[in-house]
Image (cartoon, grey):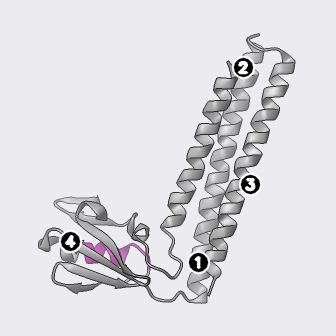
């Protein structure tokens, strides 16, 4: 029965790591990626929170240039405004219903800002994993209290939960370290 708890904890911790990977994809590091614009919200069609990918398609034209094909010409200005207000430091150039964004070189100051954001994302992932650990430990202690498992089994499962937590924290730290190198690379 507690094996089910461990499987669930593993899945939840894995989801936290997946969220970290997605968050890191939105941080740019001197090269074009369609993931850079994943968090851009557009004010269009009477809504103020439409994801960019619902009004345009984004493609990588070359290593330093993104292309955005807006499907509705009337939304070009809204897309431009959404990208500019996203705080990514990107300025689209409009050519009809198509936009081009050249990815500028990162200044040392901007790199440090991105590193702080990356550190925040990593810390959020660590907190999430620790909260999942706490939930698992509470569940195991409750099972022991309800006499569903013995005290020895409770200690064994608690040890396995801690080992699982340590593995995920290590993966988060390694992922952050790799992103840090990517951001600080000149």
Q: Spatial distance from mark 4 to mark 3, Cα to Cα?
A: 41 Å
Q: Secondary structure at mark 4?
A: strand
Q: For residue 95, say whether it is visible.
A: yes
Sequence order check, earlier mark of 2 and 3: 2
Asked if the residue at tag 1 contacts the one at tag 3, i.e. Cβ–Cβ closer than 8 Å, the answer is: no
Q: Residue at x 85, y 18 (%)?
A: 151
Q: Is residue 80 magenta?
A: yes
Is label 4 or label 1 in front?
4
Q: Tally the marks.
A: 4
Tell me which segment is drawn in magenta: 78-88
Q: Residue at x 33, y 72 (%)?
A: 59
Is residue 170 rendered to the left or right of residue 125? right
**Percent position of residue 168, x then y:** 70, 48
Cβ atoms at labels 2 and 3 below 8 Å apart: no
Which residue was labeled with disc 2?
142
Q: Secondary structure at mark 1?
A: helix
Circle 4 Cα neighbour tier, 10 Å, few/some/many (<14 / 14–19 / ≥20): many
Tell me the residue that label 1 is attached to.
113
Cα–Cα gap, marks 4 and 1 = 30 Å
Which residue is rendered at x = 68% and y = 30% of the image?
Answer: 6
Q: Is residue 88 above or below residue 40?
A: below
Tag 3 residue: 170
The quadrant in which the C terminus is found is bottom right
């Amino acid at each position: 029965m507690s094996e089910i708890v461990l499987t669930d904890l593993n899945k939840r911790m894995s989801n936290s790591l997946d969220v970290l990977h997605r968050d890191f994809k939105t941080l740019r590091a001197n090269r074009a990626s369609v993931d850079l614009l994943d968090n851009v919200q557009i004010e269009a069609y009477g809504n103020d929170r439409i994801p960019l990918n619902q009004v345009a398609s984004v493609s990588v034209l070359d290593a330093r240039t993104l292309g955005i094909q807006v499907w509705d010409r009337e939304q070009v200005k809204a897309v431009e405004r959404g990208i500019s207000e996203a705080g990514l430091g990107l300025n689209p150039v409009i050519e009809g219903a198509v936009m081009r964004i050249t990815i500028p070189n990162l200044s040392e100051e901007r790199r440090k800002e991105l590193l702080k954001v990356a550190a925040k994302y990593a810390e959020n992932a660590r907190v999430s994993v620790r909260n999942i650990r706490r939930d698992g430990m509470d569940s195991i202690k409750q099972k022991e209290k309800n006499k569903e498992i013995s005290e020895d089994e409770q200690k064994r499962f608690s040890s396995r939960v801690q080992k699982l937590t340590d593995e995920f924290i290590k993966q988060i730290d390694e992922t952050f370290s790799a992103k840090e190198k990517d951001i600080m690379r000149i």
